[in-house]
Image: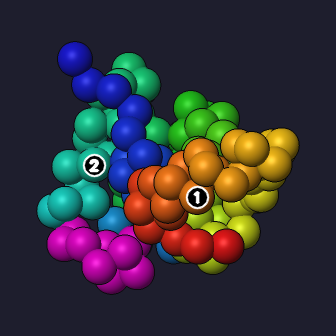
């Protein structure tokens, strides 16, 4: 059974923005046939055609027009999440403790935290 994938949604947005599978493939660094397969998988998952194919390119069908805004939001959120992770600015972790724990237990906990997250604040 076909399902919506993040790659498929990204392809949908690119094709809709550029008006052709070839232009979307060039923008995404894919082959035209890979874009075609992604669109076919999306259409199978949706149970409807998402694009009308024309000699000069493609246009969205009514179903494609309904899916596009959600796909664009999902892609934007994923891109923002990756950017947040890459920049290391997702948030802060605060440790509260009392002197006895701070002296003996906290240093190994912090070291383990650093190894697990591979970052240091």
Q: Is residue 31 magenta?
A: yes
| Helix, strand or loop at mark 1 | helix
User: Is any part of residue 101 visible from this angle?
Assistant: yes
How many residues crowd around disc 1 within 10 Å: few (fewer than 14), some, or many (20 or more)?
A: few
Does the magenta stretch mainly form a helix, a strand or a loop?
helix
Quarter location, residue 103:
bottom right
Residue 38 tag number: 2
State the residue at coordinates (58%, 73%): 120
The correct choice, above or below, for 37 with respect to 91 in the image is above
Q: What is the span of residues highlighted in magenta in the rendered image?
A: 23-32
Question: Mark 1 = which residue?
Answer: 107
Quarter location, residue 5:
top left
Quarter location, residue 84:
bottom right
How many residues crowd around disc 2 within 10 Å: few (fewer than 14), some, or many (20 or more)?
A: many
| Helix, strand or loop at mark 2 | helix
State the residue at coordinates (56%, 32%): 63
Does residue 2 appear to the left or right of 98 in the view shown? Answer: left
Instruction: In this rendered view, identify the residue nearer to me: 89 or 9.
Output: 89
Q: Is residue 116 magenta?
A: no
Residue 61 screen position, x and y as percent = 54, 40
Residue 117 screen position, x and y as percent = 48, 59
User: Is any part of residue 78 visible from this angle?
Assistant: no
State the residue at coordinates (58%, 64%): 85
Residue 80 screen position, x and y as percent = 66, 63
Does residue 26 appear to the left or right of 1 in the view shown? Answer: right
The correct choice, above or below, for 31 with respect to 1 in the image is below
Does residue 55 appear to the left or right of 109 in the view shown? Answer: left
């Amino acid at each position: 059974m076909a399902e919506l994938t993040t790659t498929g949604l990204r392809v949908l947005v690119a094709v809709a923005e550029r008006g052709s599978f070839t232009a979307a493939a060039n923008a995404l660094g894919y082959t035209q046939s890979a874009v075609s397969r992604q669109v076919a998988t999306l259409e199978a998952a949706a149970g409807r055609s998402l694009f009308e194919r024309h000699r000069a390119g493609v246009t969205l069908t009514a179903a494609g027009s309904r899916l596009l805004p959600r796909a664009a939001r999902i892609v934007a959120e994923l891109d923002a999440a990756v950017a947040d992770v890459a920049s290391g600015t997702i948030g802060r972790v605060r440790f509260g403790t009392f002197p006895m724990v701070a002296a003996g237990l906290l240093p190994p906990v912090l070291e383990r935290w650093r190894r697990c997250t591979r970052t240091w604040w």
